[in-house]
Image (spheres, helix red, strand yellow):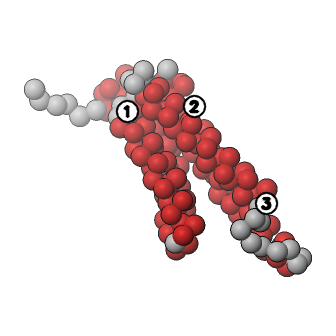
Amino acid sequence: MRATYRVLASLIAAGVMLQVAAIALAGFTTSKDAGDGATIDADYNNIGQQWHSIGGSVIGLLAIIFLIVSFLTNVPRGRTLAGIVVGLVVLQFVLAVVSFGLPALGVLHGINGLAIAAVAGIASRKAAQPAAAAAAAQPATSG
């Protein structure tokens, strides 16, 4: 299960990188289409926007599976990190919805996406540590 935890964490982090690429594609495609005379209105859509939307849903699903797997493994702080990832993903969806009405919040959507990748990357590294080494790295607690 430790390997599954690591793979899921890595997929989430990689998914965020693909999200960045997709939204960049969307922005540049929108710019090109506007320059070519396309009407950019509420009905406008392009492949980058579609990939970004689908990618967000996939990351959401992966985050839920990641949290479930975190209860089946012994990764140090694994449940906490998975819970943080899920919380950040929920926040990401909220920021996405709210940002359509208040575009300035889109900046927080971008920053939060990077936070998702960072926490998922930390979780992946924690899972990569051998179980014995991870246990030895934990500070001792008194009863």
Residue 53 falls left or right of residue 122: right
Looking at the picture, tell me which residue is in the foreground, 131 or 53.
Answer: 53
The residue drawn where x is 89% and y is 76% is 36
* Residue labelled with disc 1: 79
For label 2, the SS is helix
Question: Given the current orientation, which residue lies at the most extreme left position?
Answer: 143
In this rendering, the answer to whether 34 lies above or below 22 is: below
Residue depicted at x 57% and y 31%: 7
Distance in Å between CA atoms under marks 2 and 3: 30 Å
Q: Badge 3 is on which residue?
A: 46
Residue at the (47%, 48%) spot, across then down: 90
Q: Amino acid at mark 2?
A: Val
Q: Looking at the image, which residue is at 75% across and 65% down?
A: 43
Numbered badge on residue 7: 2
Q: Given the image, on which type of amino acid does mark 1 rest?
A: Arg
Is the C terminus in the top left, top right, bottom left or bottom right quadrant? top left
Amino acid beneath label 3: Asn
